Amino acid sequence: MVPSSRSQARQDNGSAARRLAWVVMMKRNHAGNGPSCDGETCSTTNEGPYQTVGVRGYYLTPGTQVAVQVRRASDDRVLWQGRATAQPGGNGPAGNYSVDTGRVLCGGSSFAAPLTAYVVVRGDGGQWSPRVPIAWRSCGLV
């Protein structure tokens, strides 16, 4: 390996953690199941589409195991955690992953103030990515 290649590889490896976390909105559409009847009484649900907070990352070696955490900004307490495996192909070069937290998105955007939490990600037990500030609010569907 020539010195310039080593230098480029060192630079690429040094920025790897920054490529791990992109916070995105993911939509899940839920349609009503239609009426449910029990004798003379019928009921129905009418769930409309809603969005949940998801995390997506690119430029990873396919097969990389990714740990994802959402932490509260005020005290670093883990609010949610999950795992994913980088898959080949998709919307970015090399491997990519996508994980849905299942957390209903309130207030329009995961980047709408106040930013009460942050996402960190690490691949294969390496270093944690830089913090990605997000809005993490409690709300529910009625």
Image: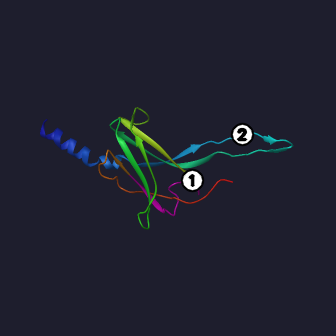
Q: Residue 120 carries which label?
A: none
Q: Which of marks 1 and 2 is nearer the N terminus?
A: 2
**How many other residues sit within 10 Å of disc 2, few (<14), some (14-19) or many (≥20)?**
few
Q: In which quarter of the image is residue 130?
A: bottom left
Residue linked to disc 2: 33
User: Where's residue 37, x and y in %?
Assistant: 80, 41
Q: Nearer the viewer, residue 57 or 80?
A: 80
Drawn side of residue 49 relative to residue 18, left or right: right
Magenta-colored stretch includes residue 109: yes
Tag shown at residue 105: 1
Scheme of image coloration: rainbow
Secondary structure type for disc 1:
loop
Q: Nearer the viewer, residue 133 or 119?
A: 119
Residue 129 drawn at (x, y percent): 34, 52
**Residue at 37% from the left image edge and 36% from the top image edge:** 95
Above or below residue 13? Residue 70 is below
Q: Where is residue 120 in the image (x, y as percent from the top left)?
A: 39, 54
State which quarter of the image contains the C terminus: bottom right
Quarter-of-image position of residue 133? bottom left
Residue span colored magenta: 104-120
At label 1, the amino acid type is Leu
Asked which secondary structure carries label 2, the reply is loop
Q: Residue at x 12, y 36 (%)?
A: 2
Dominant secondary structure of the magenta stretch?
loop
- Circle 1 residues within 10 Å: few <14, some 14–19, many ≥20: many
Q: Residue 38, image x and y in percent?
A: 81, 42
Q: Which residue shows up at 30% across the image and 52% down it?
A: 127
53 inside magenta stretch: no
- Please tell me which residue is depicted at 25% across the width and 45% down the height of the picture: 13
Task: Give the residue at the far bottom of this rendering.
Answer: 74
**Quarter of the N terminus within the rendering:** top left
